[in-house]
Image (cartoon, rainbow, N blue to C red):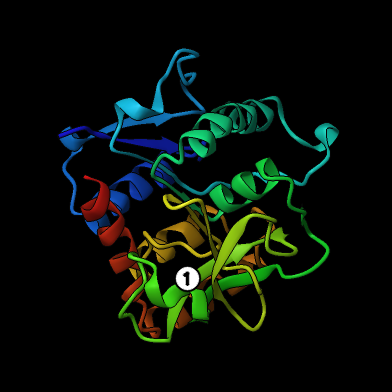
Amino acid sequence: MKRFLILQLRPETDASDDEYRAILDKCGLTQDQTHRIRVDQEDIPSDLDVTDYAGVIVGGGPGCVSDPPHKKSTLEAKIEQQILNLMPQITEEDHPFMGCCYGLGILAHHLGGEVSKARFSEPVGPTYCTLTPDASDDPLLEGLAPEFEVFVGHKEAVQQVPEGTVHLMQSAACPVQMIRHGQNVYATQFHPEADAHDFERRIHIYKNHGYFPPEDAERLIEICHGANVTVPGEILRRFAARYG
């Protein structure tokens, strides 16, 4: 069995470790079944061949692909460029890929779509997403409830469905919640790996990063624990089962 390549973009060790654990849990994978690269700490090898892996999963992060270069730290620019350098290979090979939150911005930007802070940002917490008609025969989504809760929190968003992609999920506040390019390249605006406990920890870690007023942290944690967010993890489980 080929391993899954897990690329992580969070420079905060506690957040990165939590996200990795959550991805393993929702995918039903062990550490031995993955190759983890923290892109903030090591470079993606220039000769990396994505077909050596069962699939590629890119986690979230505090960066924004739409920020102008002068507003990005050296580390943020490095992380972003490393992932963007890998995207041509992924889309040309139609290699199994799941981009989570920031991963959607990366994919859409690579495909020439507009990613910006103009509209459709969402506050930290749960929201309802609905499946589009094109989701009915998608192997990761078929048979799921037509509407379910997810966890979100993002400053930028994809402004319209990128040309050449299939629109799979939407929400009232953010129209582009999940897309597919080709048959195997997916990305979500929501966090498929996260449950309420994951978001509680992230709220503590990122409460001074501009996603929400710091004094709202405990209120947001209470809201997260009151939500019923279970279906997104099933999407990740199906991804790992299909390509593993």
Q: Residues within 10 Å of mark 1 (few under 14, many from 20)?
A: many
Front residue of this view, candidates 137 and 200: 137
Residue where numbered disc 1 is placed: 151
Report the side of 179 relative to 6 (left or right): right
Give the secondary structure at mark 1: strand
Mark yes or no: residue 6 visible: yes
Location of residue 34 (image quadrant): top left
x%, y% of residue 172? 64, 84
Front residue of this view, candidates 177 and 76: 177
Quarter of the image containing the C terminus?
top left
x%, y% of residue 170? 58, 76
Location of residue 199 (image quadrant): bottom left
x%, y% of residue 126? 49, 78
In the image, residue 4 sits, relative to residue 230, either above or below, namely: above
x%, y% of residue 56? 39, 39
The amino acid marked with disc number 1 is Phe
